[in-house]
Amino acid sequence: MTAERESHMNNEHAISVNNVGMTFRSRDGEDTTVLKGLDFHVEPGQFVSIVGQSGSGKTTLLKTISGLLEPTEGHVLVKGRPISEGLKDIAMVFQGPVLLPWRNNIDNVLLPLEFRGARTNESRGYARELLEMVGLGDKAERYSYELSGGMQQRVAICRALVSHPELLLMDEPFGALDAMTRDSMNFEIQRIWQTTGCSILFVTHSISEAVWLADRVVVVGDRPGRIVADIVIDLPRPRGKEHRFSAAFSDYATEIESHIGVTTGIS
Ligand SMILES: Nc1ncnc2c1ncn2[C@@H]1O[C@H](COP(=O)(O)OP(=O)(O)OP(=O)(O)O)[C@@H](O)[C@H]1O
């Protein structure tokens, strides 16, 4: 076993981002460095939010962690292993639910298992349990066009959870929802996280959502994207609405705003 491999195996972090950089080259040969020198870890079972200005590279970072993009510098380890070996432990949720309209909801949830040839007799029962957990047990045989946007996003979350991922990467998953649905989805994801014990990396534009959900908020600065703050959120759990109005909450939000460079008040 090589020394490098051995050090990977001894690494206990759920995610380890090591000096990651990403430079895109355009067709005319011009280089744009989007991420530079990113270093941070996510511990098993942690909920980490990522915030930053639009275009600072948050989605690019999530794509390098999920293995959709290979960083041009540095490397990412998932549970101490190179990303290519850890893919089955990771699931991703995007801003839009992207459900297949010709499949009913339970069959949409089962899709990742089918892709991997891992669907078993028990899978359908588990998919149904997940739909029940998010309050959609009675909608299992319905189609996505029969559901509201928030319900569709809950189906997409079940689809991400069906393969028992240890790591959930979420890219502005509630960005397209109205404020009330978003609030209830915030409660939902907190509950799911506490039930499953998975680690979550959660990109959002909303500072209040970031603070309310997370154990830590990582702030990405732009041009090029790099970590400008990594703030531990020391608020009790489970978190209720009252925490959003506490002085401590407001102090965290103000601190994060100052790192992002916005002064628009809590959003
Ligand atoms: N494949 C690519 N080729 C060239 N440039 C890219 C590519 N993907 C992303 N970029 C550029 O990288 C920068 C960061 O994009 P990214 O989508 O990661 O930012 P973001 O922080 O997620 O933005 P937003 O908050 O608006 O979603 C942008 O300037 C974008 O144009």
Image (cartoon, grey):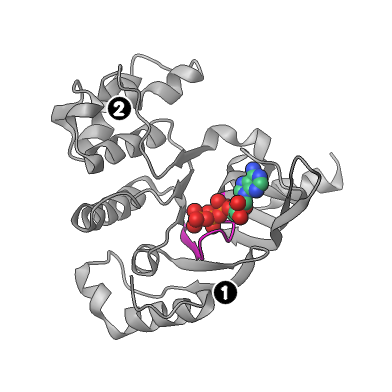
The quarter of the rendered structure image containing the N terminus is: top right
User: 5 or 212, which lies in front?
Assistant: 212
Q: Is residue 3 left or right of residue 148?
A: right
Mark 2 Cα shell of 10 Å, populated few (<14), some (14-19), many (≥20): many
* Quarter residue 63 falls in: top right
Q: In percent of the image, x 53 and y 67: which residue is there?
A: 218
Disc 2 from disc 1: Cα separation: 38 Å
Extreme residue toward the left, this view: 138
**Percent from the top left, x then y, of residue 87?**
58, 34
Q: Which mark is residue 229?
A: 1
Amino acid on which disc 1 is placed: Ala
Whether residue 44 appears in magenta in the rendering, the answer is no
- Ranked by sequence position, the earlier of labels 2 and 1 is 2
Q: In percent of the image, x 41 and y 17: which residue is there?
A: 119
**Percent from the top left, x then y, of residue 129?**
25, 31
Residue on which the image places disc 2: 127
User: 170 or 235, which lies in front?
Assistant: 170
Whether residue 50 appears in magenta in the rendering, the answer is yes
Magenta residues span 45-59
Amino acid on which disc 2 is placed: Ala
Q: Is residue 14 above or below residue 165?
A: below
**Percent from the top left, x then y, of residue 192?**
31, 47
* Quarter residue 2 falls in: top right
Q: Is residue 172 left or right of residue 148?
A: right
